[in-house]
Image: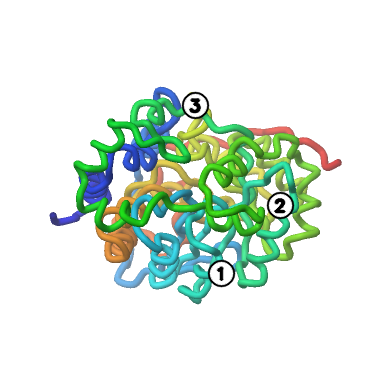
Amino acid sequence: MVHSNVADYRESARRYLPDFAWSYLEGGAEDAVTMRRNRAAYEAIAFAPQVLVDVSRISTQTTLAGNPAAWPAVIGPTGLNGLYCRGAEETLARAAHAAGLPFALSTASTSLLEDVRAASDGDLWLQLYVQQDRRIAEDIMARAQAARFSTLLLTVDTPVTGQRDHYARTGFTLPLRWTPTLLWDIARHPRWLATVGVHGVPQLVNLARSAQLGPGIEAQAAALGRQMDTSLDWRDIAWLRRHWHGKIFIKGIQTAADAASAFAHEADGVVLSNHGGRQLDGAQSPLDILAHTASIAPRGADILVDGGIRRGSDIAKAVALGARGVLLGRAPLYGLAANGGDGVRGVLALLRNELDICMRLLGCTSMAALTADRLATHAAPLNVTTTTPA
């Protein structure tokens, strides 16, 4: 199959994966209202190109968390990637480095962070979930710093797992229950079974190592889900600072007021995110609050955004509204499932090329030139209040 855009890779991934794995990758919370809204927010924005500009030479160079990046994107943190490809996180990290981008590793990764570092010399970030036993998070942070990870993404939108109806429809549980429906689902996908399924259910190996758990996925899943620390609050950014000496971003910010609180508590940046529509159905799109957040961000703070990015032009819209860059979630995973490392590199190359074309057609020669006046429709800044630091 010729892959001319991200949607083509998505279709290849859908055909390759069993229903339970495809549903885990593609599914949203409840009725997927938020997931659809994420895409609709990009589609609602129109461009206002400036013509007769010399665009014979342009640059997509930027900085992300203070480090240089070839273009304004990060391969974002996603869990259980071993469902799509063996050595998934190593593959994603290598592809990110080849594209000049950072790679963010999830706490729910299926590859050890030390192995990911061994596979790539690129800029690596750590996404952190905090369990009730905070010694687990402290150990993961210590291991990541020893492996030269540069930036921490504290995810704050998952005190509990959102209602995901597709889990019940496809029989997805951790550990998997070998029902006739699930066995038939897997049997109908022999290529996946031969390359991925034959190795068994992927393990949450980073969590297992830091929590000193055995190889059983049931205990690992319990540590990730039912044992999440629901007492986490703004004061705990100070706790993070005691254990992490690099940049700290708060991921899962869904209002400009909470972004202001993050900055007031000296976070280096925020990731505007509704978890790809997988948590609270009915939440607004991160793009809807981007301009408001940018208007109150202190100098030097980075704003990143995720959710629904499928075209290079989506990246341009986010940057024009005030984002330093975007996190790519599902799009690289479509490539990973469709064709391994070649698929991830293919997706990234498509997005980079689309961004290049979009900038030239807009009359922008650099990221700094990609401002809100290149948009025909965008939100006006809004005054917000903040919670004062404790």
Find numbered disc 3 in the image and state the secondary structure of the residue it sits on.
loop
Kind of residue at disc 3: Gln
- Comparing 290 with 252, the one in front is 252
Which residue in the structure is indicated by mark 3?
A: 163
Which residue in the structure is indicated by mark 1?
A: 114
User: Crowding at label 3, few (<14), some or many (≥20) Cα neighbours within 10 Å?
Assistant: some
Report the mark closest to the observer, 2 or 1: 1
Find numbered disc 2 in the image and state the secondary structure of the residue it sits on.
loop
Question: Which quadrant, please, contains the N terminus?
Answer: bottom left
The Cα–Cα distance between marks 2 and 1, rounded to whole angstroms, is 26 Å
First in sequence: mark 3 vs mark 2: 3
- Where does the image place residue 61, in percent across and percent down from the top left? 46, 68
Residue 326 seen anywhere in this rendered image of the structure: no
Which residue in the structure is indicated by mark 2?
A: 267
Find numbered disc 1 in the image and state the secondary structure of the residue it sits on.
helix
Q: Name the residue at 59% across, 38% down.
A: 225
